Image (cartoon, rainbow, N blue to C red):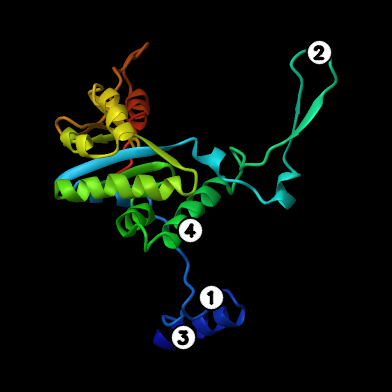
Amino acid sequence: MLNQYENIQEQIEELADIEWEDSEREEFERKYFHSVGITPRFRTYTIVLTADIAKMYRQVLLDESDSRFQRILWRNDPKPPVQTYELSTVTYGTASVSYLAIRCIYQLAQEKSLEFPVGSRISSQDFYVDDLITGCNTTEEAIDIINQTTFLLSKGGFELRKWCSNKAEIFMNANVRTYIESLHLLDKENIKTLGLLWNSQRDALLYNAPEPKFNTRVTKRSILSYIASLFDPLG
């Protein structure tokens, strides 16, 4: 059996389907965290924080040599001639848009790691696209996370907004705009967090289960259809 396995492995290597991994290679592929990995981790902290980036894709510019391929034809009414516009930022719906935006966050975190060490660490591991879900165990750490992450991302034109926490008093010591925005958000009982509902006051994850409406008799098919409508990112 072992000889057969080695023969198969040699054949695959000859076809260039795989290659040996060099653990000493300096360049490595960046692994982006999935929501399934981020959500359970933030439940381990005493103080948790959530926020998101405002209009994230609109802050990511394309290279000028590529933006000329993004043209928009537009006119306000049928009388004037059609005008041509060139979109200079990444486009919604394209296959690469999420990667390009996330890659900008990682690059910014790397370049500003000495100036904002805490913000760099948080930006590298606790974002899922434009959603930030993180935490810590002390008030001082929470304030550092808020201020450093906010200032770091602002260097790249990204604005963090809709801050929320299970410890609302920490925003009083953060920057003024963050504190004012958090007051409006904390009035809401439940907040959407990566496909789940999070009650910041009780610090509990919730599921939104719509009331089942069966127009006909209840069958196994209708029950399975209703169960499938409940989204659980944690499986």
CA–CA distance between discs 3 and 1? 14 Å
CA–CA distance between discs 3 and 4? 41 Å
Q: Which residue is mark 4?
A: 107
Residue type at numbered disc 4: Gln
Label 2 CA crowd tier, 10 Å (few <14, some 14–19, many 20+): few
CA–CA distance between discs 3 and 2? 70 Å
The secondary structure type at the circle numbered 2 is loop
Label 4 CA crowd tier, 10 Å (few <14, some 14–19, many 20+): some
Q: Choose mark 3 or mark 1, whichever is in front.
A: 1
Q: Which residue is mark 3?
A: 6
- In the image, residue 218 above or below residue 87: above
Which numbered disc, 2 or 4, marks the residue that appears first in the sequence?
A: 2
Quarter of the picture holding the C terminus: top left
Could you tell me residue 165's position as x and y percent?
22, 36
Q: Which residue is mark 2?
A: 78
Task: Name the residue nearer the viewer: 90 or 108.
Answer: 108
Tell me what residue is drawn at x 20 percent, y 51 percent.
Answer: 141
Q: Choose mark 4 or mark 1, whichever is in front.
A: 4
CA–CA distance between discs 2 and 4? 45 Å
Left or right side of 96 for 210: left
Left or right side of 148 for 168: left
CA–CA distance between discs 4 and 1? 29 Å
Which numbered disc, 2 or 1, marks the residue that appears first in the sequence?
A: 1
